[in-house]
Amino acid sequence: MRLILLGPPGAGKGTQAKRLMDRYGIAQISTGDMLRAEAAAGSEVGREAKAVMEAGKLVSDDILIRMLGGRIGQADCAKGFILDGFPRTEAQAVALDGMLEQKAIKLDAVVELRVNNSALVDRIAGRYTCAACGVGYHDAFQKPKRAGVCDACGGETFTRRADDNRETVAARLVVYHDQTAPLLPYYQAQGLLGGVNGMAEIDGVTVELFALLDKVA
Ligand code: AP5
Ligand code: MG
């Protein structure tokens, strides 16, 4: 199964992608995670991307299209993938269509996580991640069972993203509505668009997603 999760910052793309990955045995491709890894490694792309990400703007289409093109050809994508954070512009969507056509493969679904803007700042401002294994938590909505200890690996060090402050989130939301939301009618016209209520609790969103995607799988 090949799908795209569309939704603004904090909609729950990363949270739900992990669960879809486990259920359908497909790869999660988070372009945000890939760019953060490049930035941490100090590569040329990473150095260029870091400042742009911290300003809440979009990294150039050229970089992203090249990055994604390499990633979907990797072995773990053979059974399918979940695109989390790509495409974000019409140019990226058109390039993706071209890449898939070249490989003679098709998207099965594009799912919008429908959320209210007002909830997103609180979700993002409360988010943190285990530094050792990358599992995500939230100060209020997704706490580890024992405070300060990762459920998955027992790690006790956590990190917060540099772009997760209130000012940058506001900029990221503007960018989403200007540049990424126009992809909804783009995929609607291709007959691929579905949606779930992203305002439900995390487990409730997962149930709705599985119900939608089990029909596709
Ligand atoms: P990226 O990493 O993709 O960030 P984003 O799109 O802004 O989305 P987030 O990761 O912030 O949110 P999410 O939807 O994954 O939410 P999550 O599940 O974590 O991109 C970062 C930057 O990289 C961009 O700004 C850009 O600069 C660059 N970039 C990346 N891709 C690019 C591209 N294609 N082109 C150009 N530039 C690109 O959930 C958030 C929090 O809420 C968590 O703490 C979670 O526990 C909680 N939560 C989740 N669901 C719920 C729920 N239902 N109820 C309550 N809490 C919930
Ligand atoms: Mg994410």
Image (spheres, rainbow, N blue to C red):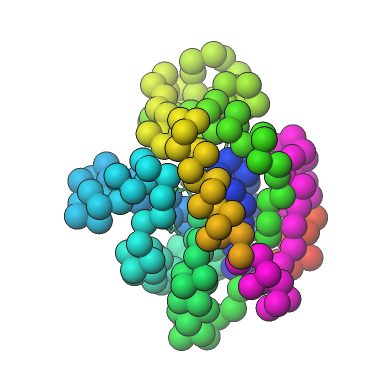
> Hey, which residue is sitting farthest top in the picture?
147
Observer-nearest residue: 2 or 113? 113
Q: Is residue 204 left or right of residue 125?
A: right
Q: Is 49 left, or right, of 202 in this rendering?
A: left
Q: Nearer the viewer, residue 132 or 167?
A: 167
Expressed as whole percent of the image width and height from the top left, the position of residue 187 reads 66, 71
Image quarter of residue 144: top right
- Magenta region: 183-210
The residue located at (70%, 44%) in the rendering is 115
Picture layout, residue 71 above or below residue 201: below
Q: Position of residue 131 (x, y in %)?
A: 38, 30
Which one is nearer the viewer's eye here, 85 or 109? 85
Whether residue 38 can be seen here: no
Q: Position of residue 13 (x, y in %)?
A: 59, 48
- Check residue 206 for magenta coloring: yes
Say whether residue 65 is visible: yes
Image point (74%, 63%), residue name: 194
Q: Residue at x 42, y 45 (%)?
A: 56
Give the vertical position of 68 relative to 137 (above or below). Answer: below
The x, y position of residue 145, in whole percent, is 60, 19
Q: Is residue 97 magenta?
A: no
The C terminus is located in which quarter? Answer: bottom right
Residue in the picture at 49% in, 18% down = 149
Q: Quadrant of the N terminus?
A: bottom right
